[in-house]
């Protein structure tokens, strides 16, 4: 039987904590964790180092709360989904009727890579809905920009307050609608220069060779090889499922390599493409999912000219 605010709820009970002080955060998190412990539910903290230590010091020694290495969990959206689904499945196999988790994204996610983390926050409403999960995602309003907080309200059905309230955000948008929206793609600074390479309808082998040639030794070999795989997959998608011409462009910066693949089609029909494995035979879905595993950032954009995928290997962070 499920307990607390999620009692009687079926599937994923997803909440945000929009806090403005340590006291505010603790006022929400501590009752949430203590309630889980009292009910004998798996109770997990996936906060960053500072906030995890804050919570740990506020709990009695040997409380029974599980603390995850937050930085490792949130390396990439697909890695986070895969890691949490494995964790949740393990708890359910052990008989858990409800699992409680409080987590937070690193502050770096609020910058240039926020687009795929916003998509993650939306997609997990679907990806975790087959588990009896009650989770709270913490956002520090002193650090998160206004556009991030606006997306938080749209991707979380509820917000938990320090007074014990659990209120609808009022702006929640269902994942299939949210993930289908066309969003502008922030221009990476390296894209202000002319591309090193611009190819039309390249074969996957030619695309891989172009990525290898763009490497100036600024990245580890495995990062370059991962980008080669990702570019090959996305070029294959564009040639098979898009509308030609398919154009590959490459830029090489001091700490990253950036590739864009553009075709004149409308892109994948599956709104979850990239974040979840394509289990329904969706055209191109597997290639996008592989690219999300391989790259440090993947951005997508639809406009009247077609569909663009941007792949970044190396440091994906730049002033937004």
Image (cartoon, rainbow, N blue to C red):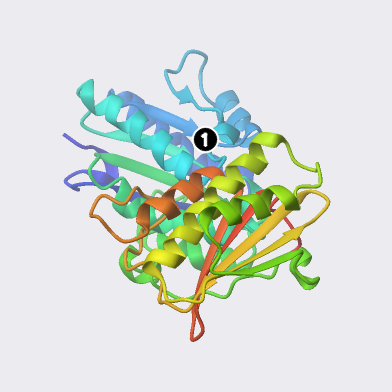
Q: Is residue 93 left or right of residue 185?
A: left
Question: x and y percent of residue 69 in the render?
Answer: 56, 28
Counting the numbered discs, the total is: 1
Q: From the viewer's perspective, is 166 left or right of 226?
A: left
Nearer to us in this view, 198 or 115: 198
Residue 165 in view: no
Compare residues 155 and 233 and report the one nearer the observer: 233
Q: Which residue is mark 1?
A: 73
Q: Is residue 91 visible?
A: yes
Q: Quadrant of residue 190?
A: bottom right
Mark 1 surroundings: few (<14), some (14-19) or many (≥20) residues within 10 A: many
* Secondary-structure class at tag 1: helix
Q: Residue at x 71, y 53 (%)?
A: 257
At a point 50% along the width and 49% down the height, the residue shown is 292
Dividing the picture into quadrants, the one containing residue 195 is bottom right
Residue reaching furthest top? 62
Of 3 and 49, the residue lying toward us: 49
Residue 123 x, y percent position in the rendering: 38, 55
Q: In the image, is residue 239 above or below residue 213?
A: below
Query: Relative to residue 1, is residue 163 depicted above or below?
Result: below
Q: Is residue 41 left or right of residue 311?
A: left
Q: Residue at x 28, y 25 (%)?
A: 91
Q: Position of residue 250 (x, y in %)?
A: 69, 62
The residue at the far bottom in this view is: 304
Residue occupying image coordinates x 64% and y 35%: 222
Quadrant where the image shows the C terminus: bottom right
Res 251 quadrant in image: bottom right
Q: Which quarter of the rendering shows the N terminus? A: top left
Q: Position of residue 133 (x, y in %)?
A: 30, 40
């Amino acid at each position: 039987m499920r307990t607390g605010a999620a009692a009687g709820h079926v599937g994923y009970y997803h909440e945000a904590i929009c806090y403005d002080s340590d006291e505010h955060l603790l006022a929400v998190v501590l009752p949430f964790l203590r309630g889980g412990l009292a009910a004998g539910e798996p109770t997990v903290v996936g906060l960053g180092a500072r906030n995890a230590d804050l919570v740990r010091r506020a709990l009695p020694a040997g409380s029974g709360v599980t603390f995850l290495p937050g930085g490792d969990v949130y390396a990439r959206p697909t890695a986070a989904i895969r890691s949490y689904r494995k964790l949740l499945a393990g708890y359910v196999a052990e008989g858990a009727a409800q699992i409680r988790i409080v987590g937070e994204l690193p502050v770096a996610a609020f910058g240039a890579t926020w687009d795929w983390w916003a998509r993650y926050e939306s997609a997990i409403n679907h990806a975790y809905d087959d588990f009896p999960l009650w989770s709270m995602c913490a956002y520090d309003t002193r650090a998160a920009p206004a556009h991030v907080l606006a997306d938080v309200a749209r991707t979380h059905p509820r917000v938990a307050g320090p007074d014990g309230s659990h209120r609808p955000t009022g702006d929640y948008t269902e994942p299939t609608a949210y993930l289908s929206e066309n969003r502008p793609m922030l221009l990476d600074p390296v894209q202000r220069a002319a591309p090193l390479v611009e190819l039309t309808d390249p074969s996957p082998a030619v695309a891989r060779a172009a990525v290898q040639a763009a490497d100036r030794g600024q990245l580890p070999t495995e990062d370059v090889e991962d980008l080669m795989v990702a570019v090959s997959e996305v070029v294959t998608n564009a040639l098979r499922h898009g509308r030609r011409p398919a154009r590959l462009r490459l830029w090489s910066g001091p700490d990253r390599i950036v590739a864009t693949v553009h075709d004149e089609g409308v892109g994948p029909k599956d709104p979850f493409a990239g974040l979840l494995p394509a289990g329904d035979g969706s055209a191109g879905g597997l290639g996008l999912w592989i690219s999300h595993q391989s790259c440090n950032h993947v951005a997508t954009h639809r406009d009247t000219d077609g569909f663009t995928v941007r792949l970044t290997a190396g440091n994906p962070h730049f002033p937004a």
